Image (tube, rainbow, N blue to C red):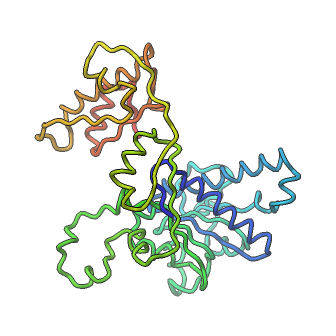
Amino acid sequence: MQGPPGTGKSYSTAFAALARMQGALAAGIPQRLFLSCKTHSATDVLLSGVAGARDELGRLRAKRPDIWAWHFEDGLLTLPLLRIAGRGGLPETVQNLAKTEADPARAILSHTHCIVGATPGGIYGLVKGGKSLFGHALCDLLILDEASQMSLPEAMLAALPLAPGGRVVVVGDPRQMPPIVHHAWETEPRRTFQQYRSYESLFDTLVALDPPYLRFEESFRLHAAMARFLRDEVYIHDGIDYHSRRTKALAACSYDDPFVAAVLDPAYPLVVIVHAEEGSQTRNAYEEALVGPLLRALADPEGHGLSARDGLGVVVPHRAQRVALRQALPGAVRSG
């Protein structure tokens, strides 16, 4: 499943996981479903999304018990949500096996139906204590999210507990962040790398095999102009009619600085600022000077009144630049 920015792939994945469990419960088929992402934070977000989706279903049962009784199994709302080697910060409905169980694998096998979240490394740690890395059959369905960042070897680690006949669902967007490996792979002379291309993302590896493919097209987050730009420049090559119906823009304000006025003109939701400064490395004072007045104008309580928690975001490639912006604008920028 390919989901461009804002198309709700994580939200849909959470409900898809519950739909699979609903079907298994209704049919009386055991089902242990694993969710895995490259990082702990992404895994926690996905598992929290499942918990949130289940909460939505709980509200549906309370509001419309007739619909619930006709379509759903009560066991869906008590389904164990488990986390392997979690680091905290998860909803209370998620059990962190690292804190409660000496043998997480045994705890998972004690449930006929459950959803388990873990990174590929966490799954490897789960199975490596046995006599073999293979043959554990802990998992019936494996969902790999953010798969454009996950390499094939990492995916193989995540799939170690998959039962014979188990299924794999891969979610991501190869047009976004790829696996970060600094090497000139295009000119790599070693035959095994050229033959198996293990440095590519899992998503790219599987797309080449022509699997069943679902593409999301509508963004619920981006402005229509931004989505149109990305469609025409990027997603058209994937056959995706990427679009958005969102048209809300900044409110019109007056600014003393003509540069700020030009950049924050609500008639232009997408603005690109081009400059010729080339001397900076990890910190760019020139761009800091460009961004500073914009952030101050956006955070001004007499104007837009935006904050880092509500409507204002800055993305930078280097920690030093982020620290510099936080120091220069402590009221508008926070760590993130």
Residue 158: percent from left, percent from top:
49, 72
The one nearer the camera, 94 or 314, is 314
Residue 111: percent from left, percent from top:
72, 71
User: Residue at image x 29%, y 83%?
Assistant: 195
Q: Is residue 299 left or right of residue 276?
A: right
Q: Quadrant of the C terminus?
A: top left
Q: Relative to 86, does residue 184 appear above or below in the rendering? A: below
User: Residue at image x 49%, y 75%?
Assistant: 211
The one nearer the camera, 50 or 207, is 207
Numbered-mark total = 0
The one nearer the camera, 64 or 215, is 215
Residue 63: percent from left, percent from top:
83, 44
Query: Quick one: which residue is furthest to the left in this view?
Result: 279
The one nearer the camera, 240 or 213, is 240
User: Residue at image x 73%, y 73%?
Assistant: 112
Q: Relative to 317, does residue 137 appear above or below in the rendering? A: below
Q: Is residue 52 left or right of residue 302?
A: right
Q: Relative to 254, does residue 132 appear above or below in the rendering? A: below
User: Residue at image x 22%, y 71%?
Assistant: 185
Residue 143: percent from left, percent from top:
55, 67
Q: Is residue 17 left or right of residue 237?
A: right
